[in-house]
């Protein structure tokens, strides 16, 4: 099987032929792909039960940095843009290697060894990437926490993951504001007593004798990352080193059709899985230049992305629907004043890309020349699972196809596969793939993604969004239960139920139904609720709506029926199958009435919690 041509992801007939061939013999495909890696010891086996590339030995850091520093030392690995137009740095592969060795040396001086967990709480600086790679160099496991999370959220994750040290910097500058990060870290670590490594103060001297790569084998872990599931506490996802890297790198190679001189700009953050797979590991593995930005897309003007694309001659631009929606409302002149004709391919990830955002991106950014790779994947999957083809005509259908080796099925509630078009079911994955997290759960030989999807009339896949109790706010995954735990900490609040509702800019937002003690000052309680979600989760977790109700709909075992609340909110007809398990079906009328009143008389019911605390 020869897959040298990147056409593989561009031509529907070739794609189909390859997909079917690879389905029959996945091992041959991966055997070919692992030639891109520099091995210490090449694996003899591709998949052995759940283990990929057993007996293979290599270094993630060597593959992402050292080998490029050897062959192309001055090539920029990272180009960074800061909060102001003039802030820019360029880090060559050799510079990056030096900094990694320095950080790795400091970690070793703190007695960090193979298998230890290292917390990272950093803005989008080159040092954030260097920190991750420094961990991988010594086989420590990084655990990055998004720097927008509160110190409580950071503390919870450090404790749960048993982190031995935390890496940070003094401050973060974003949107004209300065945020004191070290203070947050000091608060977070107060009761944990773990050392803080502030990279702004790093003076560790390095010479090559201090440096030693610790190689990784099939089961060694590269990182832990917390995401939201359907419980009140964040869910830890563990990724392997080598198999994960191979999956991220291979999907990147085909889906973005990368060329050695590509300048690649992804607007995500290392706090999320996209920042791991497609800002750090895959681009550097292939020796590309990865552009990062630590500012706000709208500060000082809403042209920051277009300015960076013009200045760096970016060829591939990977962003999120929420960013597109927030930029769509600004004057088109902000785009037109920049020459963004270097762009070749656009990408989107994190949430459904609505039609208006797709059109705007296609027409205004890609000037009808660039395909939009609307990639579907998850923290659990490690890399892209479904994407449209690169071919412009195919791309216009806006639907995706599974990556090579990925076997998907869409099933109804009874687990029966749905084959006819336009009929929604749950997206499930039947195959195993190298990027799957170590703690993935297969039930009946299938992994349930939690997402709704359907086949279009060509048999391509459209994703509709989560079917479980996870909300996707501006591409950030948050569990309804996490909101509820934070809201329930509020004095006077007895209990709460949170649902996700559509939001013009954020995609979805949180709507909280709250049962409070009688005769309370409602507006004051709303403020306290907002304080609690901000304090316990972070500013991104702000419910836009708070509605006080007398009671929540619960079934006989006491479980809150959030699907019913969603139906009530949407004003959909309620039938007996929705109500027969309820303890108190009368509550439906009450909530329906409350919502109507609130929508028509917002002053009275204070439904909108849009005053910042
Ligand atoms: O609901 C899907 C949505 O984001 C969820 C995964 O979130 P997370 O683990 O934070 O990873 C985000 C970055 C990979 C999915 O279950 N999602 C992701 N990409 C898309 C999407 N929904 C629709 N279209 C997408 N392209």
Image: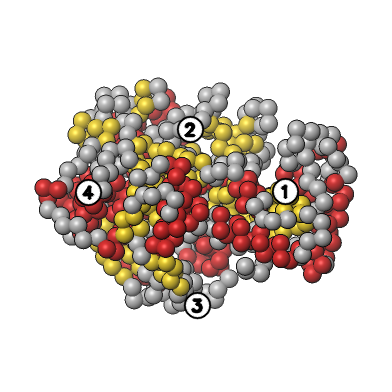
Helix, strand or loop at mark 4? helix
Binning the other alpha carbons within 10 Å of mark 3 as few (below 14), some (14 to 19) or many (20 upward) gives few
- Say above or below: 286 vs 182: above
Question: Label 3, on which residue?
Answer: 333
Where does the image place residue 155, in percent across and percent down from the top left? Answer: 46, 51
Q: CA distance from mark 2 to mark 3?
A: 46 Å
Q: Quadrant of the N terminus?
A: top left
- Identify the residue at horizontal 44%, vertical 60% (top origin): 184
Question: Label 4, on which residue?
Answer: 109
- N-terminal of the pair, mark 3 or mark 4, is 4
Helix, strand or loop at mark 2? loop
Question: Label 1, on which residue?
Answer: 495
Helix, strand or loop at mark 1? strand
Question: Label 2, on which residue?
Answer: 440
Please tell me whether mark 3 or mark 4 is closer to you in this view.
Answer: 4
Q: CA distance from mark 3 to mark 4?
A: 53 Å
- Identify the residue at horizontal 77%, vertical 64% (top origin): 521
- N-terminal of the pair, mark 1 or mark 4, is 4
- N-terminal of the pair, mark 2 or mark 4, is 4
């Amino acid at each position: 099987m020869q897959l040298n041509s990147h056409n593989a992801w561009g031509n529907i007939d070739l794609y189909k032929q390859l997909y079917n061939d690879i389905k029959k013999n996945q091992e041959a495909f991966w055997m070919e792909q692992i030639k891109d890696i520099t091995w210490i010891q090449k694996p003899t086996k591709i998949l052995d039960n759940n283990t990929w590339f057993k007996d293979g030995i290599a270094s993630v850091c060597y593959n992402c940095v050292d080998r490029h520093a050897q062959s192309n030392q001055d090539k920029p690995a990272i180009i960074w843009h800061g909060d102001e137009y003039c802030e820019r740095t360029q880090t060559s592969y050799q510079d990056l290697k030096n900094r990694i060795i320095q950080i790795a040396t400091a970690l070793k001086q703190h007695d960090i060894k193979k298998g230890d967990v290292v917390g990272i709480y950093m803005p989008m600086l080159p040092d954030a990437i260097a920190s991750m790679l420094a961990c991988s160099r010594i086989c420590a496991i990084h655990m990055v926490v998004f720097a927008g999370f509160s110190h409580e959220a950071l503390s919870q994750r450090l404790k749960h993951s048993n982190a031995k040290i935390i890496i940070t910097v003094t401050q973060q500058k974003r949107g004209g504001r300065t945020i004191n990060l070290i203070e947050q870290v000091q608060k977070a670590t107060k009761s944990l007593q773990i050392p803080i490594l502030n990279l702004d103060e790093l003076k560790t001297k390095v010479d090559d004798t201090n440096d030693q790569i610790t190689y990784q084998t099939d089961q060694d872990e590269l990182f832990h990352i917390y995401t939201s599931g359907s419980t009140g506490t964040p869910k830890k996802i563990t990724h392997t080193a080598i198999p994960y890297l191979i999956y991220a790198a291979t999907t990147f190679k085909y889906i973005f059709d990368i060329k050695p001189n590509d300048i690649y700009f992804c607007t995500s953050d290392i706090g999320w899985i996209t920042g791991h797979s497609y800002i750090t590991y895959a681009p550097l593995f292939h020796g590309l230049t990865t552009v990062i930005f630590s500012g706000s897309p709208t500060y000082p003007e809403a042209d920051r992305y277009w300015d960076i694309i013009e200045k760096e001659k970016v060829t591939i631009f990977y962003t999120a629907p929420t960013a597109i929606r927030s930029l769509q409302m600004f004057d088109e002149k902000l785009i037109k004043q920049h020459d963004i004709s270097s762009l070749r391919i656009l990408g989107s990830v994190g949430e459904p890309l609505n039609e208006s955002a797709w059109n705007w991106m296609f027409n205004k950014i890609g000037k009808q020349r660039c395909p939009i790779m609307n990639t579907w994947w998850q923290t659990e999957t490690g890399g892209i699972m479904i994407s449209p083809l690169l071919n412009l005509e195919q791309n216009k259908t806006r639907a995706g196809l599974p990556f090579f080796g990925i076997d998907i099925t869409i099933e109804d509630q009874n687990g029966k596969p749905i084959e006819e078009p336009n009929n929604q079911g749950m997206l499930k994955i039947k195959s195993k793939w190298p990027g799957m997290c170590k703690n993935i759960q297969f039930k009946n030989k299938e992994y349930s993604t939690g997402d709704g999807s359907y086949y279009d009339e060509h048999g391509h896949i459209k994703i509709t969004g989560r079917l479980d109790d996870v909300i996707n706010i501006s591409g950030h995954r948050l569990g309804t239960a996490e909101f509820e735990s934070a809201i329930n900490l509020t004095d006077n609040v007895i209990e709460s139920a949170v649902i996700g509702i559509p939001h013009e800019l954020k995609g979805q937002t949180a709507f909280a139904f709250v049962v409070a003690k009688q005769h309370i000052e409602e507006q004051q309680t709303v403020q306290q609720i907002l304080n609690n979600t901000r304090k316990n989760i972070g500013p991104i977790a702000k419910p836009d709506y708070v509605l006080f109700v007398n009671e929540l709909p619960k079934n006989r075992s006491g479980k809150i029926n959030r699907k019913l609340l969603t139906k009530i909110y949407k004003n959909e007809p309620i039938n007996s199958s929705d109500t027969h398990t309820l303890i108190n079906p009368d509550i439906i009328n009450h909530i329906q009435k409350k919502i109507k009143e609130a929508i028509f008389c917002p002053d009275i019911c204070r439904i909108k919690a849009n005053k910042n605390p």
